[in-house]
Image (cartoon, rainbow, N blue to C red):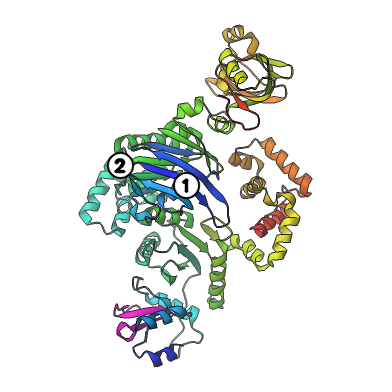
């Protein structure tokens, strides 16, 4: 595609490494392969820009300039074939991709990156999908001072006034099938926040969401109706069950959270057994009902 | 300083779940307003809508005279403190407080002035060079407060800021936040699920349940005059007792137990047409007495109860008993040695009790 575009726009250049500047006399775009390309403004009419924007994403010059390491990650993930004469770079530690998203126009990518680097106290690679979404690439380190993503959210909210979601991928030790892994995480990240109000979701948390999403919509509806019976539209009971699961099937804890007497909770769970034949105090039953609740969403 | 106004504010999530419904409230300048309620009641969502972190589905939010629904969070002149009082782990206290201002490109000397001032207010002057791991939990939370103070904001928003602290430290920090508020006089909106925290800190309380305001009022007013069963049960520890019975003639009847209803309450109940109807009696544990003088004075509000559990708390004993198969809790003086299995006479002070409609659970007034 780039070659074809170059035939039309002679000034087209591909952004390669951090020593390049994203010049303001160029209009920058990202391709589907996450390559950043620029065309000189004087070669573009407004019609050209509209047309290019239809199949390329505009690349904001307010993005932090990509670092060398980010460039290497891009090559590892997006290059289809090794570049001749260049020894393939590999990360020295296990790493994971952490997807982030925040509302459009709430914070400048440069500020976000500054804050993230301050939290990790080192240069952190970020691959931007657009100005409000992307992946942080976190290398596994022994760091006594490390903090959780839940804490990171609170810090960033108070400093940047931004609500962030994180989907934390699993650690990987090698770069095999990296492109596929990245693509799969991107897909999951795009779906998982439709199912939960949590701001931090791990890969392990997401598995039931992913599996449920794979099933046919009709089957999902049938499962939720069959398992939940009349409770399918009973928001109060659904909330009680969800809280019971969040409290690891602990009756006392659930009663405390719901501000109910333990006996009342016990009674309501017994009533659920009477109506559905399912005792969610048993782990395997709880798992089934949990999936039925996901199917209902 | 600022006043805030929420008019018919509603929050509906994409999955159609209504988190906050028809929220109307005026928050006064310099007020310390506490949103309290159980988990999932919509209190944090309300706070986040004020902050601009959650979009308002419908309704209007005003800070001062300005409608701010579409104003980005960073331009609302607010500062936030959250439950995870996490700090930048690799930065010292000074830089933790300064970082938000650095990101906003404040000048160095202005940053220094603000950080020094916040450190002085919070007694952190000697800790400015320390990293978070060298601080106690309370000191870290003070730094988190400092990070908000340096903003010089019109409104402080605090979302369960003490819930990660241990019980002792929480009590201490409660007092510190109150002192801070009386010194800075910044309008503060504070979210907690802890009714003790709410009672002790608030100028006014907003009790919420299922996204709906249940009652707004000064802590004492809400405690003494709960609008419904939920508020009566949520505010106060141990919780208010609720006993089901019927008003017949001048008495509240629970099968074979009869309690004489005082004239004033009786008049209201009869005027509202509750004679012969099922109602709920709500009485606080401290309004049940075992002292002889009360028992002598209240022969017709006396019950004979068997004690199931007696918890000695030091100056008082919490008794868990039953009357006509309905459980209740009494808080009595610990001068007598009462143990589980004892049978004792207790007098219900019905002049301080409340009656609630059985169907609507609203207080009959």
Q: CA distance from mark 1 to mark 2?
A: 22 Å
Q: Quadrant of residue B246?
A: top right
Q: Is residue A30 magenta?
A: yes
Residue range highlighted in magenta? A15-43
Label 1 vs 2, first from the N-terminus: 2
Q: Is residue A280 left or right of residue A130?
A: right
| Image spot of residue A51 (x, y percent) | 43, 82
The crowding category of the residue bearing disc 1, from other C-alpha atoms within 10 Å (few below 14, some 14 to 19, many at least 20), is: many
Image check: B322 left or right of B191? Answer: right
Residue B212, disc = none
Q: Which residue is mark 2?
A: B1
Residue B10, relative to residue A8: is it above or below? above
Q: Quadrant of residue B256?
A: top right
Tell me: A231 left or right of A113. Answer: right
Label 1 sits on residue: B9
Q: Nearer the viewer, residue B29 or B316?
A: B29
Residue B234 figure quarter: top right
Give how far across and how far down residue B112 sits, in percent.
23, 51
- Mark 1 — on which chain does it sit? B
- Furthest-bottom residue in this view: A7
Q: Residue at x 20, y 53 (%)?
A: B109
Same subunit under labels 1 and 2? yes
Q: Looking at the image, can residue B342 be seen? A: no
Residue B30 located left or right of residue B109 = right
Q: Position of residue A29 (x, y in %)?
A: 40, 79
From the viewer's perspective, is the residue at label 1 or at label 2 nearer? Answer: 1
Q: Secondary structure at mark 2?
A: loop
């Amino acid at each position: 595609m780039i070659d074809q575009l170059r035939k039309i726009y002679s000034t087209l250049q591909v952004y390669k490494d951090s020593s390049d500047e994203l010049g303001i006399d160029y209009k920058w775009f990202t391709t589907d392969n996450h390559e950043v390309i620029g065309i000189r403004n004087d070669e573009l009419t407004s019609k050209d820009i509209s047309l290019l924007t239809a199949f390329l994403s505009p690349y904001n010059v307010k993005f932090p300039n990509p670092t060398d390491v980010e460039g290497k990650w891009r090559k590892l993930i997006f290059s289809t074939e090794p570049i001749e004469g260049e020894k393939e770079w590999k990360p020295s530690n296990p790493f994971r991709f952490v997807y982030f998203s925040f509302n459009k126009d709430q914070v400048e990518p440069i500020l976000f990156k500054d804050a993230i680097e301050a939290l990790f106290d080192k240069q952190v690679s970020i691959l931007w999908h657009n100005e409000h979404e992307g992946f942080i690439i976190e290398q596994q380190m022994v760091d006594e001072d490390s903090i959780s993503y839940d804490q990171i959210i609170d810090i960033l909210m108070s400093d940047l006034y931004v609500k962030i979601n994180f989907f934390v991928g699993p650690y990987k030790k090698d770069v095999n099938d990296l492109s596929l892994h990245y693509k799969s995480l991107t897909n999951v990240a795009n779906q998982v926040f439709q199912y939960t109000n949590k701001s931090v979701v791990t890969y392990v948390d997401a598995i039931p969401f992913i599996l449920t999403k794979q099933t046919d919509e009709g089957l999902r509806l049938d499962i939720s109706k069959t398992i939940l019976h009349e409770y399918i539209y009973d928001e109060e009971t659904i909330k009680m069950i969800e809280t019971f699961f969040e409290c690891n099937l602990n009756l006392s804890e659930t009663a405390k959270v719901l501000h109910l007497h333990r006996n009342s909770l016990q009674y309501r769970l017994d009533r659920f057994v009477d109506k559905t034949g399912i005792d969610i105090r048993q782990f395997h039953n709880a798992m089934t009902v949990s999936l039925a609740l996901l199917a209902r969403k | 300083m600022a006043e805030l106004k929420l008019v018919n504010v509603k929050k509906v999530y994409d999955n159609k779940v209504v988190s906050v419904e028809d929220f109307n409230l005026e928050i006064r300048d310099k007020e310390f307003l506490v949103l309290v309620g159980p988990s999932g009641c919509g209190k944090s969502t309300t706070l986040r809508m004020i902050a601009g972190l959650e979009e308002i589905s419908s309704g209007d939010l005003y800070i001062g005279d300005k409608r701010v629904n579409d104003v980005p969070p960073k331009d609302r002149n607010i500062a936030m403190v959250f439950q995870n009082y996490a700090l930048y782990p690799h930065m010292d206290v000074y830089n933790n407080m300064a970082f938000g201002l650095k990101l906003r490109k404040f000048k160095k000397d202005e940053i220094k002035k603000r950080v020094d001032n916040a450190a002085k207010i919070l007694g952190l002057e000697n800790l400015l060079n320390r990293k978070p791991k060298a601080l106690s939990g309370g000191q870290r939370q003070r730094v988190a407060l400092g990070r908000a103070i340096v903003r010089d904001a019109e409104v402080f928003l605090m979302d369960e800021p003490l819930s990660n602290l241990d019980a002792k430290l929480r009590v201490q920090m409660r007092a510190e936040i109150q002192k801070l508020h009386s010194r800075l006089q910044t309008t503060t909106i504070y979210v907690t699920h802890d009714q003790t925290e709410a009672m002790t800190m608030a100028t006014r309380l907003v009790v919420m349940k299922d996204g709906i305001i249940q009652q707004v009022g000064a802590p004492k007013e809400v405690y003494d005059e709960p609008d419904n069963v939920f508020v009566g049960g949520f505010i106060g520890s141990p919780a208010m007792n609720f006993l089901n019975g019927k008003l017949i003639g001048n008495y509240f009847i629970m099968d074979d137990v009869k309690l004489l209803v005082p004239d004033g309450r009786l008049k209201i109940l009869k005027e509202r047409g509750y004679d012969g109807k099922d109602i709920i009696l709500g009485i606080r544990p401290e309004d049940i007495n075992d002292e002889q003088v009360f028992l002598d004075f209240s022969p017709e509000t006396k019950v004979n109860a068997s004690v199931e559990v007696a918890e000695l708390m030091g100056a008082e004993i919490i008794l868990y008993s039953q009357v006509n198969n309905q459980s209740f809790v009494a808080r009595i003086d610990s001068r007598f040695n009462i143990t589980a299995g004892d049978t004792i006479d207790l007098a219900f002070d019905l002049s301080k009790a409340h009656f609630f409609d059985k169907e609507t659970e609203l207080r009959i007034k």
